[in-house]
């Protein structure tokens, strides 16, 4: 297995099945084509939200799950949900959200 190379400036930690950890900048995940998280558990909606100009609140910029509206009400998820996106391509904030292989 090839590990990603550690980045001097990092905002994400990649943990491999064998426990090896690498600190990377989240865009390295896309640059190395390891951003396939469909079906994985994701903490978007637990630790990250995204608000659109119409005040709708989503679990991340990927808009994986609708959480509600700032105009009415919204709730964060109590636990990770399943990623429905084919690729995680959004900004580094979505890429840095904790994800776990099921």
Image (tube, helix red, strand yellow):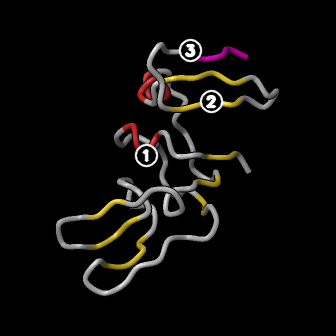
Disc 2 secondary structure class:
strand
- Label 3, residues with CA under 10 Å away: few <14, some 14-19, many ≥20: some
Residue to which mark 1 is pinned: 94
Q: Residue at x 61, y 70 (%)?
A: 78
Q: CA distance from mark 3 to mark 2?
A: 10 Å
Decide if residue 50 is on the left or right side of residue 45.
left
Q: Nearer the viewer, residue 97 or 87?
A: 97
Q: Which residues are magenta?
A: 1-5
Q: CA distance from mark 3 to mark 1?
A: 19 Å
Look at the numbered discs 2 and 1 and tell me whether their residues touch, using CB distance below 8 Å. Answer: no
Decide if residue 80 is on the left or right side of residue 72.
right
Q: Indicate which disc, 3 or 2, sits on the residue closer to the N terminus.
A: 3
On the image, the x and y values in percent for residue 10 come to 48, 24
Quadrant where the image shows the N terminus: top right
Q: Indicate which disc, 2 or 1, sits on the residue closer to the N terminus.
A: 2
On the image, the x and y values in percent for residue 81 come to 60, 63
Is 16 inside the magenta-drawn segment? no
> Which quadrant of the view contains residue 56?
bottom left
Residue to which mark 2 is pinned: 14
């Amino acid at each position: 297995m090839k590990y990603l190379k550690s980045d001097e400036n990092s905002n994400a930690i990649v943990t491999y099945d064998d426990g090896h950890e690498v600190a990377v900048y989240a865009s390295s995940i896309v640059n190395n084509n390891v951003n396939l998280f469909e079906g994985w558990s994701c903490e978007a909606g637990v630790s990250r939200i995204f608000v659109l100009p119409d005040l709708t609140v989503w679990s991340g910029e990927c808009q994986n799950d609708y959480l509600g509206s700032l105009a009415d009400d919204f709730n964060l998820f109590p636990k990770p949900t399943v990623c429905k996106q084919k690729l995680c391509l959004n900004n580094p904030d979505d890429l840095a959200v904790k994800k776990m292989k099921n």
